[in-house]
Image (cartoon, rainbow, N blue to C red):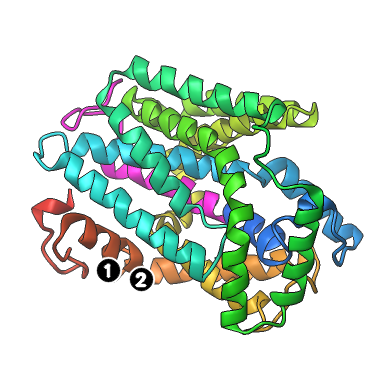
Amino acid sequence: MAYSPASSGPISPAERIDAIDVLRGIALFGVMAINIVTEFRVSIFAQFVSYPSPESPVDRAVEAFLSVAVELKAFALFSLLFGIGLAIQFDRLANSGRRVLLLVRRLTVLLAFGLVHLCLLFNGDILTEYALAGLIVLPILFGPRWLLAGAALVSLALYLAMQGFPPPGLFPDRARIWYQVVEATRIYPTGDFLDVLAFRLRELPFIFPLHVFIIPRTIGLFLVGALAWRIGMVQYPPRRLLFIGLPCIGLGLALILAGLEALGTIVLALGYAAAIIGSARLPRGARLLGWAAPLGRMAFTNYLMQSLIFGWVFYGYGLGLFGRIGAASALTIGVAVYIGQVFFSSWWLRRYRYGPVEWLWRTLMYGEPQPMALSSTPQPTSA
């Protein structure tokens, strides 16, 4: 069933968004787990040079599990979700003469948030890349579904080709990467905020090639998400989504274990998305997974909040645990923060329409204050 703003479907729009928010809330756990284990705890480049860090058999088991089942898959899920969300906004603004202006403003504001986050808090930021990829994808949304499908295939094929044939000169040599890891291990756990900030800015030229390498996949998955919304796949009967999702999960894991990690990650992310959305739309699944919906509705706020908290935990202006604890201990801290965010998000959304950052984003997008308290009357621009 193709979606249109006035179409009816097997479930209401609110229920569809609830299922998407459940997926977003669960995907946020995966992003948190990878960020805290591989980027806040140690240098992001340590994985490329096998730099030693505190490890036990439990730590190695945690790292192995995250590598196979979560690493890059959570980010791929977020890319799919961003594409779905962008297509929803695009279609719902179809009758607005300001559609392009509003969506460009939305992505430009996101870019500003991303640059601040990237420079001041965490150079593993994904918001900047998502804003730039969104600006590339936006014109394609005016085209028919075959154009979305073709552009998605081209982008994903380019990403897969780059795995075997990376652009020459894109990545720095091993010695320069090793030096960055050594410097990170020296500065991050002991430096004050300005020391950490200065080093983070010096790391940016080394971070940039990673985004260049991954952005074709991001664009491709944005388009896959938009296409899934356009063809009504998100609105498929839940059991059909499970029928699609579970075999994709099995195939994705098999591809990863067979050494085809880039392709397997994409297939596994698609499987996760279909299985979780399908489960969340079943009565029992909605009861079991409903806790994740408030977290997903406030994913922007929670993502930035994690950077604030983890920066204080691992950097020298806080507890200075960078490079001093293993993966299992770091993940335990992350799980504790995540659980706290589950309760905080539920508490907040019983009182307000949006998370605080989500409210600011919408307000800047529409150019006028949006209603915040649940008792306030929604404005027409809030559609």
Would you name the residue on which mark 2 appears?
348
Query: Which kind of residue does numbered mark 1 sit on?
Result: Tyr
Rendering coords of residue 5 (x, y %): 18, 32
What mark, if any, has residue 338 been given in the picture? none
Dominant SS type (magenta): helix
Is 177 situated left or right of 161 in this image? right
Q: Nearer the viewer, residue 130 or 248?
A: 130
Q: Is residue 53 visible?
A: yes
Q: Is residue 17 magenta?
A: yes
Residue located farthest toward the right when viewing the structure as drawn: 57
The amino acid type of the residue labelled 2 equals Trp
- Highlighted range, magenta: 1-30
Q: Quadrant of the N terminus?
A: top left
Badge 2 element: helix
Residue 111 x, y percent position in the rendering = 37, 54
Closest to the observer: 209 or 127? Answer: 209
On screen, residue 253 above or below 313: above
Could you say which is closer to the camera, residue 228 or residue 275?
228
Residue under pointer 1: 352
> Residue shown at 44%/28% (left/top)?
224
Against 105, residue 53 (above or below) is: below
